[in-house]
Image: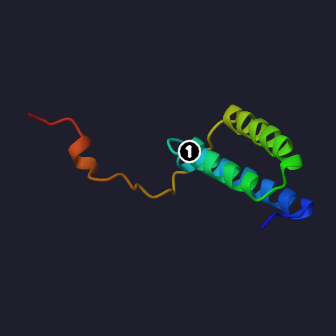
Amino acid sequence: MLFPADVLDTEICKLRGLLQMLHEDQPDVMEDIFEFHVTSLITHASPDHHARIRAAARDMLADVLSRPVRPNPNAPDIRLMPEVLLPSAA
């Protein structure tokens, strides 16, 4: 199923929001998830839209990476076994 142009533009806007959220919350997986979604958009778009999607994605990634990460003191600490990562007091 190919997206019509208006749906494609909406999905590209959603991608920007996802990228910003990942930049702030999960920067270690941001580029992999972003690549997955860009590839998904390309597979659901006609070939004449592929260059526009790639250019928009490249610009988005550069823009978001240039922004500072806003600290969120209320974010949950989801590290696995954080006590193991602490230096021992021995």
Horizontally, residue 66 falls left or right of residue 76, namely: right
How many marks on residues? 1
Answer few, some or many: residues within 10 Å of disc 1's Cα (few below 14, many 20 plus, some between 14 and 19).
Answer: few
Amino acid at the residue labelled 1: Asp
* Occupied quadrant, residue 8: bottom right
Q: Name the residue under label 1.
A: 32
Residue 36 locus on image (x, y percent): 61, 50
Task: Examine the rendering and report whether any part of residue 71 can be seen.
Answer: no
Q: In this view, does 42 lie to the left or right of 5?
A: left
- Classify the position of the N terminus by image quarter: bottom right
The residue depicted at 68 percent of the width and 55 percent of the height is 40
Element marked by disc 1: helix
Residue located farthest toward the bottom when viewing the structure as drawn = 1
41 with respect to 27 (left or right): right
Tell me if I can see residue 57 in this picture: yes
Residue at screen point 23% across, 48% down: 83
Depth order, front residue of 3/28 = 3
Q: Residue at x 80, y 55 (%)?
A: 13
Q: 86 or 21: nearer the eye?
A: 21
Residue drawn at x 61%, y 44% is 23
Residue 11: quadrant of the picture: bottom right
30 sits left or right of 9 in the view: left
Q: Where is residue 38 in the image (x, y as percent from the top left)?
A: 70, 49
Residue lying at the far left of the rendered structure: 90
Which quadrant would the C terminus be assigned to in this image? top left
